[in-house]
Amino acid sequence: MAKILIVDDEPRIRALIREHLEHADFECEEATDGSACLAMLPTCGADLVILDIMMPFMDGMTCLREMRSRKLDTPVIMLTARGEEYDKLAGLEGGADDYVVKPFSPRELVARVKAVLARTMPKNTAGDSSYVFGDLVIDTASHSVRIAGEEAPLTPKEFDLLVFLVSNKGMALSRERILQKVWNYDYYGEDRTVDTHVKMLRSHLGPYRENIVTVWGIGYKFDPDAGRQAR
């Protein structure tokens, strides 16, 4: 289930968008301005941001520029009451993936969300159950990982950890969130549980070990571009 972060200062707009997205089986979180959005993004695990342009404190365009300057590559659909071509081009040139003008059809917005996610979520070039990054192939159907055709000897929990990181690629995931999602919500572990499994996982990934990046003060993320020169 993909997660959408809805960023708009109008509660009724957020409620309207949330209602239709949840009806379409998306998980939603909300933020009231660009500053709140930037604070939430590193740990909330959003797959896409719906970002209003006209907001107090920090507007959507400023938030978008700051996201991209921080290398936060989460897809963004800009949302605004203004329809001038200049605004649309500024948003798209600033790194937005799509643009919707208020008043909008909620069904159209949901369709655009699905279209953007279809373009930006990890591609399954080796089948519907696989993630592929160069010579690294993660097959969720067979529960296996291959590097240049050779199977990596991952434990079941290491595999689950890798799949969770990959399915949230580019996102900084806190140790607490990793514990909750990989070890389930009823698990009360310690940070070193995650650190130990990350260390073991890296030891099995060969040249792709550098794709699991430590985010100091937060946790870890999977960066498909990390260590590319070394390979």
Image (cartoon, helix red, strand yellow):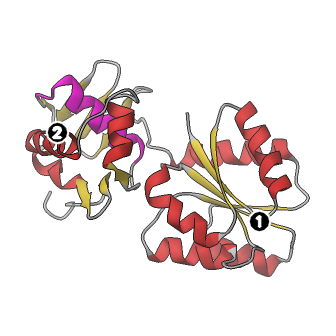
Query: Could you tell me the amino acid type at mark 1?
Result: Asp
Nearest to the observer: residue 169 or residue 35:
35
Q: 214 or 71: which is nearer to us?
A: 214
Q: CA distance from mark 2 to mark 1?
A: 40 Å
Which residue is label 1 attached to?
9
Residue at the spot 76% in from the left edge and 65% down from the top edge? 9
Question: Where is residue 121 shown, x and y percent of the image?
Answer: 49, 45
Q: Please name the residue shown 16% across and 25% down the image.
A: 155
Q: Which residues are magenta?
A: 153-168
Using the rendered view, name the quadrant where residue 28 is placed.
top right
- In the rendered image, the residue lying farthest to the right is 103
Quarter containing the N terminus: top right
Magenta stretch mostly in which secondary structure?
helix
Disc 2: which residue: 197
Horizontal and vertical percent for residue 126? Answer: 36, 31
Find out whether the residues at labels 2 and 1 contact each other: C-beta distance under 8 Å.
no
- Closer to the chain start, of discs 2 and 1, is 1
Determine whether the residue tagged by mark 2 lies in a helix, strand or loop: helix
Residue 182 shown left or right of residue 3 in the figure: left
**In the image, is residue 30 part of the stretch drawn in magenta?**
no
Q: Is residue 94 visible?
A: no
| Count of marks, rendered view | 2
Residue 105, position in %: x, y? 88, 48
Identify the residue shown where x is 24% and y is 30%: 159
Residue type at mark 2?
Answer: His
